[in-house]
Image (cartoon, rainbow, N blue to C red):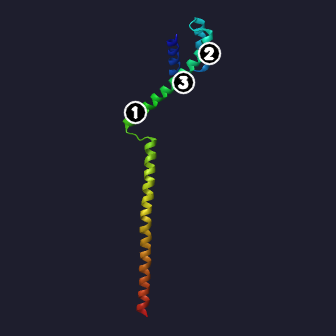
Amino acid sequence: MRDELRRMALIGSGVAELTKSRAEQIVKDLVKKGEVGREQASQVVKDLMDRSKDNRKEIGAFVRGEIRSQIESLGLGTKRDVERLERRIARLEDRAKKQVAPKTAAKKSTAKKSAAKKSTAKTTSTS
C-alpha cells in the first residue's frame, strides 16, 4: 500500500506539483478500493503532500546540479565569478588612483617650483 502511494506521489510530483485536492482524490480512491482505512486517510494525504514536497526539492537540487555541470563544461563564468572579478577590478582601480594621485601632485608641485625659480631668475637678471 505505502509503495503504491509513493509511486503515485512520485508520478504526480515528477510531472506537476501534487496539489492537496489531487492527493485527497488519490486517497479517496484508495479508501474506496479498501487499500486505506478512513481513519488513516488524513495521515495518508499528509504523507503524500510531504513526499511531494521532498521530491520537488530533490528534483530542484538535481536540476541545479546539472545546470552547474553544463556551465562548467562550457567554460562559462557564473554570477559569483563575475561579482568576484568586479570586486577585484574595483580594488585595482582604487589602488591605481591612489598611486597616480601622489605622482600627479608631485609633478604639479615640481612644475610650480620650476616656474617660481624661472620668474625669480628673470627678475634677478633684469635688475
Question: Looking at the image, is 87 positioned above or below residue 102?
Answer: above
Q: Position of residue 32 (x, y in %)?
A: 60, 6
Please name the residue shown 52% across and 10% down the image. 1
Q: Residue at x 42, y 63 (%)?
A: 99
First along the sequence among labels 1 and 3? 3
Q: Which residue is mark 2?
A: 42
> Going by the image, does 39 lie left or right of 62?
right
* Quadrant of residue 18 within the rendered picture: top right
Residue receiving disc 1: 69
Q: Earlier in the sequence, mark 3 or mark 2?
A: 2
- Residue that badge 3 annotates: 53
Position of residue 121 relative to residue 87, above or below, is below
Q: Quick one: quadrant of the C terminus?
A: bottom left
Instruction: Point out the tag, 2 or 1, that comes first from the N-terminus.
Output: 2
Select label 1 or label 3 by which is in front.
3
Q: Where does the image place residue 3, in percent across and percent down from the top left?
A: 49, 13
Badge 3 element:
helix
Residue at 37% from the left image edge and 35% from the top image edge: 73
SS at mark 1 in the image: helix
Q: Residues within 10 Å of mark 3 (few under 14, many from 20)?
A: some
Q: Quadrant of residue 75?
A: top left
Give x and y (percent) for residue 33.
58, 5
